[in-house]
Amino acid sequence: HTAEVDEHLRTALGDLYEQVEVEVLMNDPASISRTDTPLWDVLQRAVPFVTENGDAWLGGPVKARLKMAGKDVRSLNEYEGHLNTKIQFLLNAALGFLTTEQNNLFKVLTIASVVGIPPVLVAGVYGMNFHFMPELSWHFGYPFGLALILISGVLPLLWFKWRGWW
């Protein structure tokens, strides 16, 4: 009967027959988990075909076992779909948490750059020591420059606090 079963499986599976080592699977059912072929799909197609078209060469107990195997394959496919849905949900949740953490990190970096750039700009201008800078000849020119640097850093920080962004 092995040759007949093999021929019927070849007819049922078509192109997939060459991808699946059917003879190995028939003789060693434990090898199902070791193949790279989407075997549940193969079995889902093969079992109903063999069950419906194998009346002449299948015995009653074998046909009953095949029907049960077909139900088991459908059940496992549904369970696999359920698990895939759960895994996708968990993956989306993890990505959501990562996105939130990244947003917080970029918010801190944005605040640091907005608070830090104006004082650097003021210090850069006053560090040029141009000849026609009236502040350099003032008595309080140096404290004025330091106060301007401090104010240009504190004002954006206070604005972020007031807006509730930090």
Image: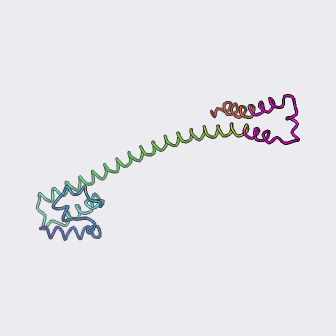
Image position of 47 with respect to 18: above or below: above
Quick check: 55 left or right of 83?
left
Quick check: 45 left or right of 88?
left
Residue 32, image x and y in percent? 23, 57
Quick check: 89 left or right of 49?
right
Q: Is residue 45 magenta?
A: no
Q: What secondary structure do most residues of the magenta stretch adopt?
A: helix
Residue 53, image x and y in percent? 19, 67
The residue lying at 23 percent from left, 70 percent from top is 10
Image position of 43 with respect to 11: above or below: above
Q: Quadrant of residue 5?
A: bottom left
Image position of 46 with respect to 152: above or below: below
Report the label total: 0
**Of residues 120 and 95, the one drawn nearer to the viewer in this rendering:** 120
Q: Quadrant of residue 25?
A: bottom left
Range of magenta residues: 120-149
**Of residues 48 and 79, the one drawn nearer to the viewer in this rendering:** 79
Where is the C terminus found, in terms of image quarters?
A: top right
Residue 145, image x and y in percent? 79, 33
Where is the N terminus found, in terms of image quarters?
A: bottom left
